[in-house]
């Protein structure tokens, strides 16, 4: 998405009217981006009662945490080193000898200890404490603080774990409730949350970190196709892929200066002889032309054209008629235009995030099913 851009889109054009996106649709994007699509039809009441995404995350994180506390939090193993009077785990011979512990009837040991003070539980407590300082609703703030203190009494420390510690704490398939709880906690720190600014109810922290929502949209779209497209119908979904320039001869330093070509999503259906290269853009689909009226963005067209034409190879039949799609979020705008350029179908499509969630889902499901040449 970031590659081959000949010009920069003005920041005000990229932000869209984010305060008009319903909380339900932000929740929809979050679920797919987080790999939690199975929770899509749950928590209807919480979604309707939440004025913004931040309140929704807080309500659901409290709900998930309360449920885990009632059923007992997940335990994990923590590595410890200690001096004991009996052997536990493995003996640290060097430490024991250097400190003359054997003579005192002691031994230095390294062992794994079962504990509730795991990275996932630490992350949840840190998220609850963070939310308690952000929220305007006093009842919700109190609920977050109460749960954070409950985790503390259970033995969970208040230190936020590092990214590496979180990544190492793998959640098993049967731990679905933990998966939801941890994903919500991550959203507090990593994904888009709204800001409260005077004069506007901004749904997302776009002014501070517009890139975060762009990544949320891009990841949600990729995961949506991965979940919704059936392998039984021949579809395969590939995440971002780096293309190589078909360079026949080059000077020694050219590789340093050539831009990188990285796609967002590639869909393939071998039985139907189709390959669709999708690039998501978190900007308005149209821009004002100096000659009057609105036009598609030139640099986006050049970028997609490069993806399609540069990868043509006789030993890769799908590359010779691959399709390209530029996919934009929109508010109250519906664009779906197509053209065939030198044998490649090119499509410009918007997803109106102001529409009901069911409409958004139906729109996304329909995109790969209709070839541009059939429209």
Image: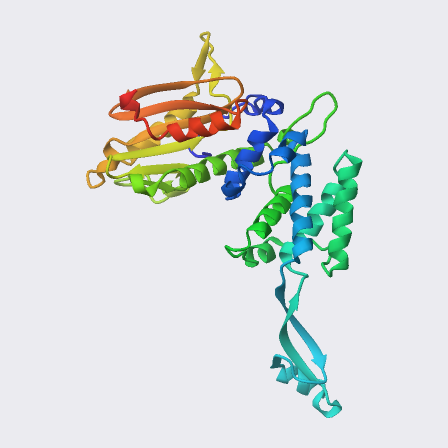
Residue at x 64% of width, y 57% of height: 119
Residue 50 lies, in percent from the top left, at 67, 31
Q: Residue 209's image quarter?
A: top right
Residue 129 lies, in percent from the top left, at 74, 47
Residue at x 37% of width, y 42% of height: 238
Q: How many marks?
A: 0
Residue placed most toward the observer, 348 or 94: 348
Q: Residue furthest left?
A: 314
Residue placed most toward the observer, 284 or 120: 120
Residue at x 54% of width, y 41% of height: 39
Judge whether 187 appears above or below 352 on screen: below
Residue placed most toward the observer, 318 or 178: 178
Residue at x 31% of width, y 31% of height: 308
Q: Residue 273's image quarter?
A: top left
- Residue 263 shows in the view: no
372 sits to left or right of 160? left
262 sits to left or right of 235? right
Residue 51 lies, in percent from the top left, at 68, 29
Residue placed most toward the observer, 226 or 44: 44
Quadrant position of the N terminus in the picture: top left
Q: Residue 98's image quarter?
A: bottom right
Q: Residue furthest bottom?
A: 103
354 sits to left or right of 97? left
Residue 368 lies, in percent from the top left, at 35, 31
């Amino acid at each position: 998405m970031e590659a081959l851009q000949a010009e920069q889109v003005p920041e005000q054009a990229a932000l869209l009217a984010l305060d008009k996106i319903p909380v339900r649709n932000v929740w929809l994007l979050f679920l797919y981006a987080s790999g939690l699509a199975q929770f899509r039809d749950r928590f209807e009441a919480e979604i309707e009662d939440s004025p913004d995404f931040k309140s929704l995350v807080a309500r659901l994180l409290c709900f998930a945490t309360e449920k885990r506390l009632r059923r007992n939090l997940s335990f994990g193993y923590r590595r410890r080193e200690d001096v004991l009077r009996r052997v536990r785990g493995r003996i640290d011979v060097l430490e024991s000898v250097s400190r003359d512990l054997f003579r005192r009837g002691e031994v230095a040991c390294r062992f794994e200890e079962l504990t509730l003070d795991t990275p996932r539980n630490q992350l949840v407590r840190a998220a609850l404490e963070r939310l308690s300082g952000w929220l305007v609703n006093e009842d919700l703030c109190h609920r977050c603080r109460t749960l954070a203190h409950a985790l503390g009494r259970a033995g969970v420390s208040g230190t936020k774990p590092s990214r590496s510690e979180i990544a190492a704490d793998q959640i098993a398939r049967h731990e679905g409730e933990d998966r939801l709880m941890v994903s919500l906690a991550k959203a507090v720190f990593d994904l888009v949350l709204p800001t409260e600014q005077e004069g506007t109810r901004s749904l997302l922290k776009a002014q501070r970190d517009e890139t975060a929502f762009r990544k949320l949209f891009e990841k949600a779209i990729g995961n949506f196709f991965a979940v919704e497209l059936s392998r039984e119908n021949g579809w395969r979904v590939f995440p971002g892929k780096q293309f190589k320039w078909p360079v026949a001869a080059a000077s020694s330093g050219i590789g340093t200066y050539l831009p990188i070509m990285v796609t967002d999503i590639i869909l393939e259906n071998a039985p139907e002889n189709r390959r669709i290269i999708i690039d998501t853009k978190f900007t308005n689909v149209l821009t004002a032309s100096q000659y009057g009226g609105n036009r598609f963005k030139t640099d986006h067209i050049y970028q997609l054209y490069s993806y399609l034409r540069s990868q043509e190879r006789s030993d890769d039949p799908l590359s010779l008629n691959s399709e390209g799609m530029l996919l934009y979020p929109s508010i109250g705008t519906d664009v779906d235009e197509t053209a065939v350029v030198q044998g490649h179908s090119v499509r410009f499509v918007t997803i109106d995030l102001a529409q009901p969630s069911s409409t958004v889902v139906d729109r996304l499901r329909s995109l790969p099913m209709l070839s541009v040449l059939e429209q």
